[in-house]
Image (spheres, helix red, strand yellow):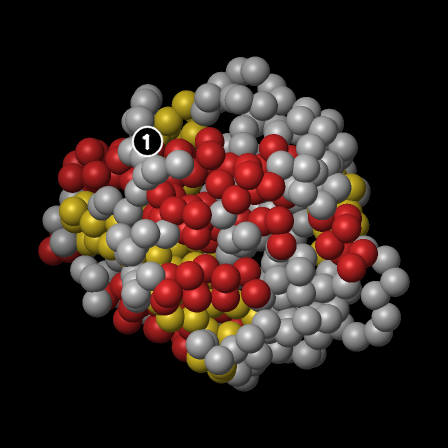
Amino acid sequence: MGKRTAKTILIALVLGLTVAFAGGCGGQDDAGSGQAPQENGGASSSGGLTGPASEADIRRIHNGYGTIFVSGKRIEHPADTSTSKVVDWRREPAARAEKGLKVRVSDGIVYSVSRYTDGRNEGEPLNLHMILKQNSEWRGEEPVVLFVPGGGFLSCRIEHKYENVHRYLIQRGFAVAVMEYHVVGQGRYMDAARDVRDAINWLKENGGQYGLKTDKIFLIGNSGGGYLAALAACEDPSDIACVVNFYGLCDIINTKADYDDAAVAAQHQPNSSDSQFVNGVYSGKSLTDDPEEAEKADPIHYVDGDEPPFLHFHGDQDLWVSPSQTLHLHNALLAADEPSTRYVVKGEGHGSAGFRTEKALDIAVRFMEQYR
């Protein structure tokens, strides 16, 4: 499938940033809280989980589609680090903006209306949420970071969960927009990738009225959002300055490959969140039942040497998304002679504190500043 330019429909804007793997748009956990599994899954500074992995770690998501969310028990097959930079940020301070920084928020604006292709049959607004520096001298000079939040393909919350991160990026001269997208039961992977393109198009067409510089849009995504940012950028790199990928998926059929065999088998079931996002909630297909579709869902399927620069971060103790996932994309980009840098963060699990340190965010900001 060639690269495509997504069609922009009814649109508007809401602003903010979240680096959370948290629920919101769809899916409930075991307790029926209305949220997908929370971030910090897997290991943190303690150094990881140990012990035998006799069965998969499964959460049943009460969203009406029989969805299960699968994680690993421990890292059975460590990912190669020979093409990556290995760091340890467990004792580094959290990133914080200056106390006197003032921001203004624009929200409640719809950038698109979802086109349900799976499960429910009615569309609903998809929002962007934006935070800007409250200082007139920046008008017309602020580049825009479009943040694609994670949520296990079950949710896409856009509230201010990580206010310090928002403010840190704004202090460094960026406006921040975070977007909603199709999740399990609303659509499939190609619908959500199209949402990213629609949000980019909306920002380019309408960002000027907010005093923003929109010749190029900067993409940041975490977890499932990192996957969607990568997929959108590899399919159609136009108007994208660069991509910062925090522990994102890539080769979805192998997202549990670094764990035990039980986790791999459970993730391949037709009712896993990954299977449903790729094939649809009513398809009855597992990830291995339709390898051609799984291949199309992999961002490297579209890598042709025309991609924007990439920066990847992944914890070596991530038990939700195998660390080899970012390696898979990183090596494919290097093979295509595209700029790609990957950091392996020692002792960190999925979305744990190391990714919100000054070290991590300074690296991300300096990377983006090269392409302003």
Q: Is residue 112 above or below residue 274?
A: above
Secondary structure under badge 1?
Answer: loop
Q: Is residue 85 above or below residue 138?
A: below
Q: Is residue 159 above or below residue 110?
A: below
Q: Nearer the viewer, residue 212 or 121?
A: 121
Q: Quadrant location of the C terminus?
A: bottom left
Taking the spot 53% from the left edge, 49% from the top edge, the residue there is 224
Total residue callouts = 1
Q: Position of residue 348 (x, y in %)?
A: 60, 73
Q: Is residue 285 above or below residue 15?
A: above
Q: Amino acid at mark 1?
A: Ala
**Can see residue 171?**
no
Instruction: Indicate the quadrant where residue 130 lies.
Output: top left
Find the residue positioned furthest to the top: 121
Q: Nearer the viewer, residue 166 or 121?
A: 121
Residue at the spot of label 1: 6
Badge 1, how many Cα within 10 Å: few under 14, some, many 20+? some
Q: Position of residue 313 (x, y in %)?
A: 47, 67
Q: Nearer the viewer, residue 208 or 288?
A: 288
Q: Quadrant location of the N terminus?
A: top left
Taking the spot 32% from the left edge, 35% from the top edge, the residue there is 4
Q: Position of residue 48 (x, y in %)?
A: 71, 74
**Can see residue 70?**
yes
Taking the spot 61% from the left edge, 58% from the top edge, the residue there is 321
Q: Nearer the viewer, residue 46 or 252?
A: 252
Q: Position of residue 101 (x, y in %)?
A: 30, 62
